[in-house]
Amino acid sequence: MAITDHRAWAALVSHAERMRGVHLRELLADGQRCAAMRAELDGLVLDYARQNATGETMKLLFELAREARLAEKIAAMFAGQRINTTEDRAVLHVALRLPAGSSLVVDGVDVVPEVQGVLERIGRFAEAVRSGEYRGATGERLTDVVAIGIGGSYLGPECVAEAWRTEPGCAAAAEGRRLRFLANVDPIDVARALEGLEPARTLVVVISKTFTTAETMLNARTVRSWLIERSGPEAVLAQMIAVSTNLEKVAEFGIDPAHAFGFWDWVGGRYSVWSAVGAVPLMLQYGERPFREFLAGGHEIDEHFRTAPLERNLPVILGLLGVWNTSVLGYGARALLPYCQALWKLAPHIQQVDMESNGKRVGLDGRVLPIDAGPVDFGEPGTNGQHSFYQLLHQGRVVPADFIGFRRSQRPIRLEGELVSNHDELMANFFAQPDALAVGKTAEEVRAEGTPEALVPHRVFPGNRPSNVLMFEELTPRTTGQLLALYEHRTAVEGFLYDINSFDQWGVELGKKLALTVRRYLADARQGKAAGADGFNPSTRDLLRRYLGQRED
């Protein structure tokens, strides 16, 4: 059923019209309302008092959730039902986070022992590399890792690797080691990934479920050539490993299938950081313990999401407010603003999690959606973003935002003579920006400051711009797991409400297919063959000729 067919939807649309006349300046003055719009979980606080919402708004949103059978859909996902209907697959990234000793049977098979078996294999291999027991072809210790993959095989692992890089325990575990990621097929990315690395000390991880992903395999062949040229052909067997399920292709490439680590078709790419996709590079860099803590943090959110009442369920609240902002109030973008530099790769990861999941035009029934689903996600760590796009947030279009902060810094600094510590300076901005967006500044307040009348309109801040505030104790492997799982489940909630399939990605196919035609044309043209460009439209035909340096006929 389309979201607009629910009775609660009509009530929300009518309610939204009334809410347009209510300013957040007024709503934030109500202490009882502010206290009600707060949810907590083991040190994690979600404050949504700066949303254009009241108790009545939330009541209607929870009614929408019940009419959309949200709780049933959540249960179906955790039970391993094939909710990815277009690909006839279960959606079970949550199984990757289940602790040893748990049980989850899918198609007659308990998947938990399989998952734990792969993690144990990775842990043993990573420890052998880190300890120097396993060495490269020339006998050198393997201190550097290049992980080759794209999309979910890159965005999630890099996000987590960067989040842990300055965490004291992880930094100590990674001392003397380097982890690089190679994703883009652009040769510049190859040059940057390999810059300064010694081939004899480099271990290469090729991450591709099918071992056929065009960009990944070209990059893998390029790095294989680099290894062979400098260390000989034996380096391929000794210093290249795979994360893949296609052992035949792995062997054809020259990698020992015994050095391949698999995962399952119920793990979507954008959720695969919890699998061997993330475990291999992250354990090689930081050891097994941080990754296990990461899984535990994700599992804590899973259990909360699975069992908490809708009214106190953090992912549910985030998802309902997302639908309210995007599809009822009509705000087509939202910002993810972590006040923590270690999370500088969070926004690109969540872009894929959210936009590849919910950027859909049809519902599960195949009918075109009556409304747009899924906003444009973007973001940047604070305070950098304040000097980039906050101008638009404050005085341009309305963009709902999530502010993410931490009570303690990974690397605290307090200079003698300074009024506050560096982290307090950061967090002063963290607390100020949501209030500035919500409350704004009136013309009367501007005039009271003695501002010349001609400048008054330029210095008015309309306010009434919604945001959430998420605050954790500290960024650790465990809280990183909580954070990523929280946003994964927010995306699932929104997809369940829209009644779309959040777990396929047919939209990425067409461009890749057309690229094959262009590739064949370029190959023929480079070899001096008569490459007909008649299959392209006039604009593309002209651009291709210019790219190849050809003259007009």
Image: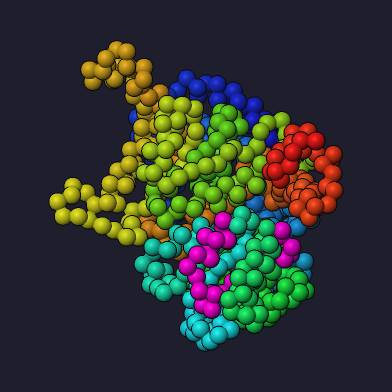
Left or right: where does residue 65 sit relative to residue 343?
A: right
* Coordinates of residue 462 in the picture (x, y in percent): 40, 23
Identify the image quadrant of the N terminus: top right
Left or right: where does residue 491 sit relative to residue 249?
A: left
Q: Quadrant of residue 465?
A: top left
| Image colouring | rainbow
Identify the image quadrant of the C terminus: top right
Question: At x 27% / y 51%, what residue is drawn?
Answer: 422
Left or right: where does residue 152 sit relative to residue 145?
A: right
Question: At x 41% / y 31%, what residue is drawn?
Answer: 391
Question: At x 67% / y 39%, what residue is drawn?
Answer: 498
* Coordinates of residue 133 in the picture (x, y in percent): 52, 87
Q: Residue furthest left?
A: 417
Of 489 and 415, nearer the camera is 415
191 in magenta: yes
* Coordinates of residue 154 in the picture (x, y in percent): 58, 59
Q: Residue furthest top?
A: 453
Q: Quadrant of residue 495?
A: top right
Question: At x 61% / y 54%, what residue is drawn?
Answer: 186
- The answer, for residue 410, to whether it is visible in the render is yes
Of 167 and 295, nearer the camera is 167
Q: Where is 392 relative to 214, above or below?
A: above
Of 124 and 469, nearer the camera is 124
* Coordinates of residue 198 in the picture (x, y in percent): 50, 74
Label total for image: 0
Q: Where is 60 relative to 236, above or below?
A: above
462 in magenta: no
Left or right: where does residue 251 sit relative to residue 415?
A: right
The span shown in magenta is 188-214
- The answer, for residue 368, to whether it is visible in the render is no
